[in-house]
Amino acid sequence: MKYVKYDDFWWKWNDKESPLNKAQLSRPDYSDVCIDATELELVEVESFSELNWYGMKLYDNKYDTGWLDRSGKFYGCAYEYHTEQAEYIHKCTEEELEEKGFIKITKDIIENKLIGYFSGDSYNENMQPTKAQIKYLEELQNKKDCMIWFVYTSDELNDEMEPS
């Protein structure tokens, strides 16, 4: 299959239905829009999952929002691209990442705060964020000079994260 890179996303190249210099955009928010692909990067891969997403909206550490794994490694993505990153970068669902102990870092656009969602259990020591995750969140909090809200999605405890 052939794909072109446009607007920080990979799009399916449609040789049969599009003129040779056009790419059919296949996401709902671009319904039936054709773009001039003459100057765009065209790649051919066996499957969509083989595409390199680094440096795009789905995987770029220039963003403060994204996923934080148990070792403290951050996978940045643009705001509201968590589902796509889970699917295309990690090859699973958001729920599966949460079950693996990843923290979803997103933001409250109204209050302009970062929020860390963790599906662990605040009452179970084995289901707590790791020291590496807490360290990353503390550093992010200090760098952005903000308070990160830390939310446990598996119980009723919703507290601000307090640096240790």
Image (cartoon, helix red, strand yellow):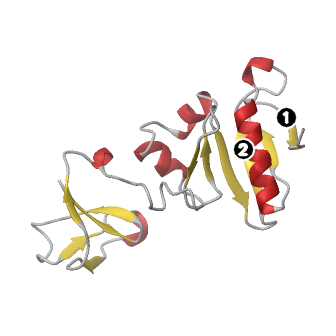
Relative to 164, 151 lies left or right = left
Residue 108 % position (x, y): 75, 60
Q: Quadrant of residue 106?
A: bottom right
Q: Residues within 10 Å of mark 2 (few under 14, many from 20)?
A: some
Q: Where is 60 relative to 68, above or below?
A: below
Judge from the rendering whether residue 24 lies leftward or rightward of residue 94; answer left or right.
Answer: left
Give me the residue at 24% from left, 45% from top: 47
The amino acid sitting under disc 2 is Tyr
* Label 1 neighbour load within 10 Å: few <14, some 14-19, many 20+: few
Residue at x-position 16% and y-position 78%? 21
Count of numbered badges drawn on the protein: 2
Q: Residue 56: image x %, image y %?
A: 44, 61
Question: Disc 2 designates what residue?
Answer: 136
Q: Name which residue lies at 19% across and 76% down.
A: 22
Measure how far apart labels 2 and 1 are at the Cα level. 24 Å
Q: Mark 2 or mark 1: name the one nearer the start of the chain.
A: 2
Residue identifier under label 1? 156
Q: Amino acid at mark 1?
A: Glu
Q: Is residue 144 above or below residue 46?
A: below
Name the image quarter holding the C terminus. Answer: top right
